[in-house]
Amino acid sequence: MKKSGIIILSVLLICLCTNGLCADKGLMILCGAGFKLPMEEAVASFTRQTGVEVNVTYGGAGTLLSQISLSKQGDVFIAPSPDFMEKARSRGHILQESIKGFGYVVPAINVQKGNPKAIRSLKDMARPGIKVALGNPETVFVGMLGVEIIDKGLNPQEKDALKKNIVTYAEDFNKLASLLLLKQVDAVIGFSSMSGWYPDKVETVKLNSKEIHRIGVGQAAVLAYSKNKSAAEQFIGFLTSREGQTVFRKYHYFGTMEEANAWIGAKKPVGGEYRLPSEWFRK
């Protein structure tokens, strides 16, 4: 190859890498486990189109925040609620101007396909013999939502009965879903999207609109420690694009707050933190 050709090729490669398109300059994503299945599909499409390799760590949002605080590493943080993103911002972990939303989640009761225990309501989860699981309310957004729903939706006797039925607290949404798939529990308080993950194995039972106090929204932001900010921004752009939104709708996430509220049948705030009563803290 002529010297001039080598120079031109080198310049092109430098430009591609500067724009975050160099395949060996991958991305590290820290993502709330409630987005795992659609995120895997979105990541595969993004990598296929750009050549940028993406490695994703899934977990409870609180656990991921602790990981970021300790490691000071990663390119993109994806949270299920604005309050978790605000915690990341207040600790200096993210670039505030990069925050983008991409999919709304609504709390619901999830049961095994066919609903063999005929669980139709929150009170049904308090019946004797029903095995229940929640997300860990200290670190998992859907766990915190579940505790709030129970605390505000049941009288003291019903609440005590339901708490006796809780056999475990899952460390993230994905593991909460696995408990249903393995038939280790009869019901969980999860998201309506869980039946979109596993339509042949999971059903969603809607809560009464008065029992839902807040909803969540996926938010993505570039981490302050990113070594590939251009590609990180490009990935977030893909999530919020029409193609990215189509992937999330496929798994029963809501594209807008209006869609989520229409499904609920009432207007609900997005995010916000429920102060966990001391009785719910795990020893």
Image (tube, rainbow, N blue to C red):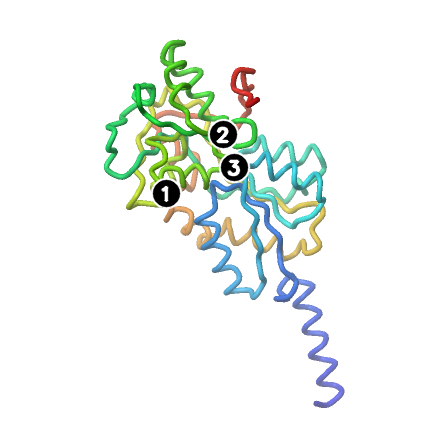
Q: Quadrant of residue 86?
A: top right
The quadrant of the rendering that contains the N terminus is: bottom right
Crowd tier of the residue under label 2, counting other residues whose Cα lies within 10 Å: few below 14, some 14–19, many 20 or above? some
Which amino acid is tagged 3?
Answer: Pro
Q: Nearer the viewer, residue 24 or 58?
A: 58
| Residue that mark 3 sits on | 80
Inter-mark Cα distance, 3 to 1: 15 Å
Q: Residue 175, image x and y in percent?
A: 46, 40
Q: Which residue lies furthest to the top in this view?
A: 156
Q: Is mark 3 on a helix, strand or loop?
A: loop
Q: Residue 280, image x and y in percent?
A: 52, 19
Mark 3 or mark 2, which has the lower sequence index?
A: 3
Q: In which quarter of the image is residue 25?
A: bottom right
| Residue that mark 1 sits on | 252
The quadrant of the rendering that contains the C terminus is: top right
Q: Residue 47, image x and y in percent?
A: 53, 62
Q: Which mark is residue 270?
A: 2
Mark 3 or mark 1, which has the lower sequence index?
A: 3
Crowd tier of the residue under label 1, counting other residues whose Cα lies within 10 Å: few below 14, some 14–19, many 20 or above? many
For the point 56% across and 43% down, the residue is: 78
Q: Depth-wise, is mark 1 or mark 2 nearer the camera?
A: 1
Inter-mark Cα distance, 1 to 2: 18 Å
Which amino acid is tagged 2?
Answer: Val
